[in-house]
Image: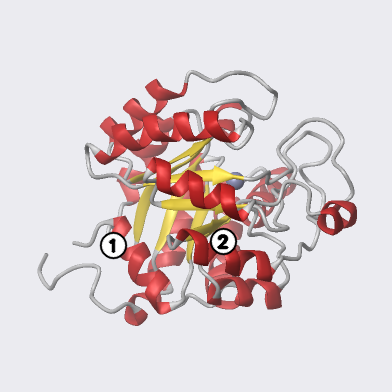
Amino acid sequence: MLTVAEVVRQAQAAGIAIPAFNVPYLPMIEPVVQAVVDQNSFALVETARLEWIKFESQGPAQVAAEFARWSRPEHVRLHLDHVPVVDEDDQQVDFLPVFQQALALGYESVMIDGSRLPLDENIQATRQVVELAHAVGVPVEAELGAVFGHEAGPLPSYEELYASGRGFTDVNEASRLVQSTGCDWLSVAIGNIHGAIASGRKDQKKVEARLNLARLEQLAQATRIPLVLHGGSGIMAEYLRGAMKRGITKINIGTEIRQPYEAAVQATGSVTQAQQAVYERTTWVISAFLGTSGLLDRLVSPVMKPGG
Ligand SMILES: [Zn+2]
């Protein structure tokens, strides 16, 4: 069986991006897996620290246990999303124990988010996680630049943000971070934005984000590793396609499937109906939005060897 690192490398070579679906509610896992399988695709199921603190996914152990019930390793693998060094509320996080726990639980790839730190401290934290994870053969995603949206305070207007390029990943810094940490994938900020999670804002329609594709191309050339696009929901299709051609190999999808789940629970009180809504939206994301149906057939070698 291919490792996640190998699948992602093959996707990079083929110019395809692998979706990574966030599951802030445990019952979302079953329909996400089912949609990926039915589309003969490949995806990551992922959980971020804020989803077990501010939503209902409970913790890395609970997500891993629920994932194990529906596990289809030829189609889906489990990823640990954002574990920040400093979180969205400016609190320091004791991050190393979270990684130790996730690695022991069998998470197959992990993300350390040092993006709120000065570069040198980001490098230092990322290096610590790379050392831990690589010791057990697990790839590490790092982040550089500011993908806004999770913070509680007022956000700058998207147009202002995009025009100013504030928080966009710097090319020289990216090259330094990758070279001095040995991280495997890099999450970049090029106009993408997270869906708001603050109460009162989390149900709002997400802004239609654009991407600075010229910057992306420079980042891909400078780093030579698979790049990750957070805040995939709501990005305009033309930019999304351009990004996949220029080195984006993993696309995180959160808001797009969270909002239908919450809306269905609110309207019907039925988890089963909410799961159906997640199934339908995940299917749409894979087939229409990202165009990754049949992804397994587009990789050079099979994810699973026959009989393996
Ligand atoms: Zn993110």
Residue 87 visible, this orientation: yes
C-alpha span from label 1 to label 2: 21 Å
Residue 291 located left or right of residue 214 = left
Q: Quadrant of the C terminus?
A: bottom left
Q: Identify the mark nearer the N-term, 1 or 2.
A: 1
| Closer to us: 130 or 278 | 130
Q: Which residue in the structure is indicated by mark 2?
A: 219
- Residue that numbered label 1 is attached to: 6
Q: How far from the left and from the top, in percent, is residue 132?
A: 30, 32
Left or right placement of residue 213 versus residue 5 in this view:
right
On screen, residue 302 above or below 176? below
Marks 1,2: beta carbons within 8 A:
no
Q: Quadrant of residue 80?
A: top left
Say which of marks 1 and 2 sits in front. 2
Mark 1: which secondary structure? helix
Instruction: Answer with left or right where residue 130 lies relative to residue 265.
Output: left
Is 36 in front, or is 90? 90
The residue sitting at 68% across, 46% down in the picture is: 147
Q: In the image shown, does 211 or 264 lie closer to the viewer? A: 211
Callout 1: 10 Å neighbours few (<14), some, many (20+)? some
Q: How many marks?
A: 2
Quarter assignment of residue 244? bottom right
Mark 2 element type: helix
Question: Which amino acid lies under the numbered mark 1 shown in the image of this protein?
Answer: Glu
Query: Does 288 appear above or below 139?
Result: below
The three-letter amino acid code for the residue at tag 2 is: Leu
- Up-down: is 237 above or below 273? below
Q: From the viewer's side, name the closer residue of 308 and 157.
A: 157
> Outermost residue toward the left?
307
Q: Residue at x 74, y 34 (%)?
A: 151
Asked if the residue at label 1 sits under 8 Å from ligand 1, the reply is no
Q: Position of residue 195 (x, y in %)?
A: 72, 48
